[in-house]
Amino acid sequence: MIRAALAVVLVLAISVAVLALAGEAGHASIVWMGWRADLTAAALALITLIGALAALVFWRLLLWVIEAPRRAERARAETRRRQAGEVLTRGFLAVAAGDGIEARRLAAKAADLAEDAPGLVRVLAAQAAEAAGDTIAAQAAYSAMLGFPEMRLAGHKGLMQLAQAQGDRATALRHAEQAYGQARTARWAWRALLEAKLAEGDWDAARDLVKGALDRKIVSPIVAERGRAALLAASAAGLETAPEAKARAQAADFAAEAAKLQPGFAPGVVMAARLLAAQGKPTRGAQAIEAAWKVAPHPALWLAYRDLKTSETPPQRAERLGDLAALNPTARESRILAVEAALTGGDPVRAAEAARALEAEPVTARIAGLMARVAFAGGRPDEARVWMARGVSAPREPDWSDLDPEGRAFAYQPGDWARLVTSFAETGELIHPRHERRERVMSELPELPISYADPAPLLAADGGAQAPYPIDEGHYEDDEPPPPPSPRPSQRRPATRRRLASAPRVAK
């Protein structure tokens, strides 16, 4: 303000000086208490301006002196506030570092300094007690928070975590329920309740929680949709083997709805196709698999698709599987299915052409087994033997582990379904519990003869039976071929047994 007044006085002084220099200074007379003063108007203006400025400076100085105690008090409060912020920061850092003793010391110090931040002080005191291992003090601190509306959620969360650490699931669930009943959104409370319902296998209650989370905007619509589809499939899995026909019909409805919500959720689609086929609706099951194949192909899908019809010839089945692969031709599973379809139809040439699209794929046991079948079908048993050997040490495919050789695909336990719901809802990806447990899966390597085959006897040039090609036949140029021994009759191999070689080796 003083700077603004000085600027105004300076401008007016310059204006008066310009008028005086121009010869228009004017004339002024002042008579006061018998005194008379004659002076120019410019001088009077300057005197008036200087006097006003002096009065303003004096007034500001007087106010500064009067407000000095208040300024000192504000300075002391600001210093305490800054010190409190530093102590709180150091205290929370000590909690994060796990130094409970230092955290409790700083919490006590912050209680004296941070009078205007009682909430932070209480949170620090509770967390410091936890870090120090003083459960009773931590529980008391969190319980004290329940009396303040703005701290109630934090108190319930702390008490829930303490109860979980002590193994008191009932108390933890009670605090989660009370927190979820608050008007404010608490994702952790919803997650705790959902995990509890999943652990109990209460799929209906879990679906209600997912719907409530969507209404409260705790989760996004896509997460809620994926979670609901997985929960419907879990419910269908529990009702599929029920003795009541009504329950099995409900399972089919649940599975069909899951497949409709998330076509890329293979467990729900496979179950829906199986249950619909059992109800005499294979066409609907095929449509569900076809929609799923366009989104996320899975080996269980084409196996279920294959089994929807049992009264067709191999060429007809091959054509149907080829049509399924054509729905998503660029997918890896579609390229594999094209090879399977050709082998099913008995067309080794077409199978070899389709197998070329898999040459860039990493070699797994499943790929090695498929290549071995292609080579054997094409009359290249030596190549098939090489692929079989590579497949023995090749890694297994997680998706293939979802196929139970003694049961149905995705034969999950209740705990597996609980994990699957959470994983698929949040990430959209499937888990592979059988792969994690290293359980036995469907064989990825075919049962082909490795060393010998039993083909029809070869014919010699004279039309008679040609002797089988001996294993130790062939010699090098620098070696003298040993005279053939005359084997005893009991040592001669039967004429119908030969090596699995595609042609005799050429001697060097």
Image: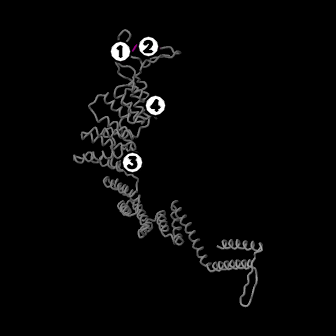
Alpha carbon of mark 2 to alpha carbon of mark 4: how far? Answer: 43 Å
Amino acid type, callout 2: Pro
In this rendering, the answer to whether 176 lies above or below 257 is below
Dot 2 lies on which element? Answer: loop
Please say whether residue 414 is one of the residues in the magenta stretch. Answer: no
In this rendering, the answer to whether 474 lies above or below 255 is above
Alpha carbon of mark 2 to alpha carbon of mark 1: how far? Answer: 15 Å
The colour mode here is: one colour
User: Is 505 left or right of 72, judged from the image as shown?
Assistant: left
Dot 3 lies on which element? Answer: helix
Q: Position of residue 2 (x, y in %)?
A: 66, 73
In terms of secondary structure, what is the magenta stretch mainly?
loop
Amino acid type, callout 4: Glu
Question: Which of pointers 4 and 1 lies earlier in the amino acid sequence?
Answer: 4
Dot 4 lies on which element? Answer: loop
Amino acid type, callout 1: Pro
Query: In this figure, which residue is indicated by the disc labeled 3?
Result: 424
Alpha carbon of mark 4 to alpha carbon of mark 1: how far? Answer: 47 Å
Query: In this figure, which residue is indicated by the disc labeled 1?
Result: 489
Label 4: few (<14), some (14–19) or many (≥20) C-alpha neighbours in 10 Å: few
Q: Position of residue 206 (x, y in %)?
A: 33, 54
Question: Which of pointers 3 and 4 lies earlier in the amino acid sequence?
Answer: 4
User: Is 90 left or right of 428, judged from the image as shown?
Assistant: right
Disc 2 versus disc 4: nearer the observer: 4
Alpha carbon of mark 3 to alpha carbon of mark 4: how far? Answer: 31 Å
Pick the front one: 54 or 286: 54
Marker disc for residue 484: 2
Query: In this figure, which residue is indicated by the disc labeled 4?
Result: 359
* Magenta segment boundaries in residue numbering: 482-495
Q: Position of residue 452 (x, y in %)?
A: 38, 23
Dot 1 lies on which element? Answer: helix
